[in-house]
Amino acid sequence: MFYEIETKRPFDDVVSAIADAAAQKMFRVLTVHDVQATLAEKGFQRGPYKIIEVCNSKNAYAVLEADPRVGVFLPCPICVWTKDDKTVVSTMKPTLMSRFFPGVDLGTVPQDVEKTMVEIIEAAR
């Protein structure tokens, strides 16, 4: 269901590495949610946590043309947080989309995107 790694790299280095790798793979970083800061505004304290939303327009277009409801899976989030002196990176596997849309022909897009997402995450290792 998830692809996840742990690394000893510093949190901010991992976030930067993901952004760089996404760009190299023709994925655009749409936004970075600083969850730690957002929660702190409401009085909740937690360690560093960011959600990096990435998207490839060609792939997004293809799956949305197949079924606009696939948009509930877009853009692809990559979560980064710290745990026990390590940085953790996690994303949901895009191939899960096919389970939620069994009658929809998504082609090889879910597999292709999953391969790319793994490569982006591995670049941050």
Image (cartoon, helix red, strand yellow):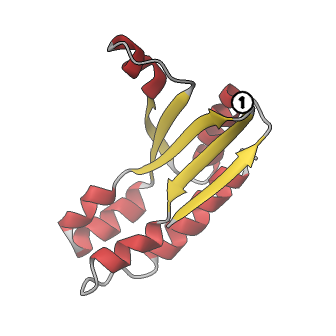
Amino acid bearing label 1 = Asp
x then y, percent, for residue 114: 54, 66
* Above-or-below relation of 121 to 94: above
Q: What x and y, as percent, mark residue 115?
A: 60, 68
Residue 55 vs residue 124, the one in the foreground? 124
Residue 57 located left or right of residue 121: left
Q: Which residue shows up at 36% across the image and 71% down it? A: 97
Residue at the spot 65% in from the left edge and 32% down from the top edge: 16
Q: Quadrant of residue 86?
A: top right
Q: Residue furthest right?
A: 8
The residue furthest left is 68
Q: Quadrant of residue 109?
A: bottom left
Question: Is 54 in front, or is 49?
Answer: 49
Q: Nearer the viewer, residue 70 or 8?
A: 8
Q: Which residue is mark 1?
A: 13
Whole-percent x, y for residue 50 in the image: 51, 32
User: Does 39 appear above or below 27?
Assistant: above
Q: Is residue 67 left or right of residue 27?
A: left
Q: Residues within 10 Å of mark 1 (few under 14, many from 20)?
A: few
Q: Residue furthest bottom?
A: 103
Name the residue at 39% across, 55% down: 57
